[in-house]
Amino acid sequence: MQILSNSIQISHILLKEALNTAKVIVDATAGNGNDTLFLAQNAQPDAKIYAFDIQAEALYNAKEKMKNSCMRTDIKVNFIQASHDEVQTYIENNLDLVIFNLGYLPGGNHAITTKSETTLKALQIMLDKLNVHGHIAVVVYPGHEEGLKESQLIKDFASSLAKKYFTVGWYQMINHNNNTPALCWIEKVGE
């Protein structure tokens, strides 16, 4: 049995199941490419994956991770240097699966971080574009100032979603420190 000691591990277990049927997939924060690689390794052959990041360094790192991995050749990832709140500019189709892994680029400039305003805007856009039975995973990092703000705003926003249309879970290790990362898992259940 796998030990679930952090929010990313939990998100990957939930994502793996959702990837069985997902056709249009978005990594809203490509970062160093860990989630992008996970999505590509577990997606169906006919899936389309889009990886967004505002930093050229992040997209370079993600592309290198893909090149240096045992990447399947039947999955193409579209890397897009843009903010995740610009998704409608790049993707016309509705979405089946989205992951946000918020905060700053590990190993990069910690002053460049996701911002609650654009993240909430992107989350609303992606919820509107999400197919019924589609999922959104949002991993938040309340251990830094912007991350704490972002975490609380996302938790408040997600908890206000109408249960007629969405099911929302919030997963966080409660016996760790107060600022441990958390996962917000959203499933669209109705139109």
Image: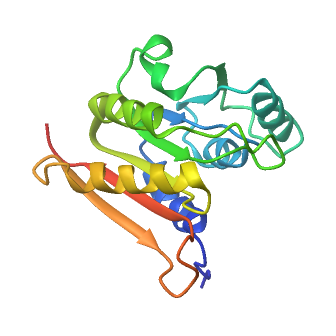
Please tell me which residue is depicted at 14% across the width and 54% down the height of the picture.
Answer: 163
Query: Residue 25's x, y, as percent?
Result: 50, 35
Q: Is residue 133 left or right of residue 164?
A: right
Determine which quarter of the picture holds residue 27: top right
Q: Residue at x 15, y 46 (%)?
A: 165
Quadrant for the C terminus, please. Answer: top left
Percent of width and height locating residue 114: 58, 39
Report the residue that reaches farthest toward the top: 89
Viewer-side residue, 7 vs 110: 110
* Residue 124, quarter of the rendered image: top left
Quarter of the figure with residue 65: top right
Quarter in which the N terminus is drawn:
bottom right
> What residue is at 52 percent from the left and 76 percent from the top?
178
x 27%, y 30%: residue: 128
Q: How many marks?
A: 0
**Residue 13: percent from left, percent from top:** 52, 64
Q: Residue furthest right?
A: 68
